[in-house]
Amino acid sequence: MREVVLDTETTGLNPGEGHRIIEIGALEMVNHIPTGKTYHVYINPERVVDPDSIAVHGLTNEFLDDKPLFADIVDDFMAFLGDSRLVIHNAAFDMGFINAELERLGRDPLPMDRSLDTVALARSKFPGARANLDALCRRFSIDNSHRDLHGAMIDTDLLAEVYIELIGGRQMGLSFTDTGAAAPVTVMDPLPVAAA
């Protein structure tokens, strides 16, 4: 089964107030194993990024000025998604922004039932516990020390690891690597036969 783990960064918190997507990060998983295929793009939002948002992700207006518009990347983005289930941390947020961008271009929105919300999954498994990405990384001993600011691709990579743990984790001690070494063989002398 193909799934796409997905995250966005935005100019603000509400697409209804005209806020836009400025970064998309996505990675492909097949049967819960990352394939190495990713999609990553920065986007010119055609508006100013709120200072509070810059403090979260560090993406400035100057950095985004020469990036493509959402209209320029939408076909490649939708092709990467295909018809796969989308694994998203706080799916309502990202899906709301993606659908606002699609509707702005006269395209059909993505149905919410295509998404699996890892916040909801974490809250169902760990009621009352914090369910943000940093807290889940700590819970599952996933190294997120390289995450100073939010970034769509960094967060997508971390979320893929968290998601695997939320659905049962990797089987410890199982290895599919072949060392190429032959197993040791012990040759034993035959036992003496007693005379009758």
Image (tube, grey):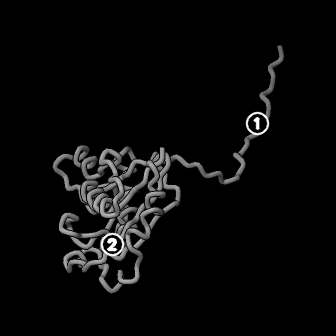
Residue found at the very far top of the displayed protein: 196
Taking depth in this image into account, of 101 and 81 the one nearest to the observer is 101
User: Relative to 171, is 48 above or below?
Assistant: below
Residue 147 percent location from the top left of the image: 34, 71
Q: Is mark 2 on a helix, strand or loop?
A: strand
Q: Indicate which disc, 1 or 2, sits on the residue closer to the N terminus.
A: 2
Q: Is residue 137 visible?
A: no
Residue named by callout 2: 22
Q: Quadrant of residue 63?
A: bottom left
Q: In which quarter of the image is the C terminus?
A: top right
Taking depth in this image into account, of 28 and 127 the one nearest to the observer is 28
Residue 20 percent location from the top left of the image: 28, 69
Q: Is mark 1 on a helix, strand or loop?
A: loop
Residue found at the very far left of the displayed protein: 128
Q: In which quarter of the image is residue 21?
A: bottom left
At x 80% / y 20%, what residue is drawn?
194
Which amino acid lies under the numbered mark 2 shown in the image of this protein?
Ile
At x 26% / y 78%, what residue is drawn?
47
Residue 165 percent location from the top left of the image: 37, 50
Residue found at the very far front of the displayed protein: 106
Residue named by callout 1: 188
Is residue 35 rendered to the left or right of residue 180?
left
Which amino acid lies under the numbered mark 1 shown in the image of this protein?
Met
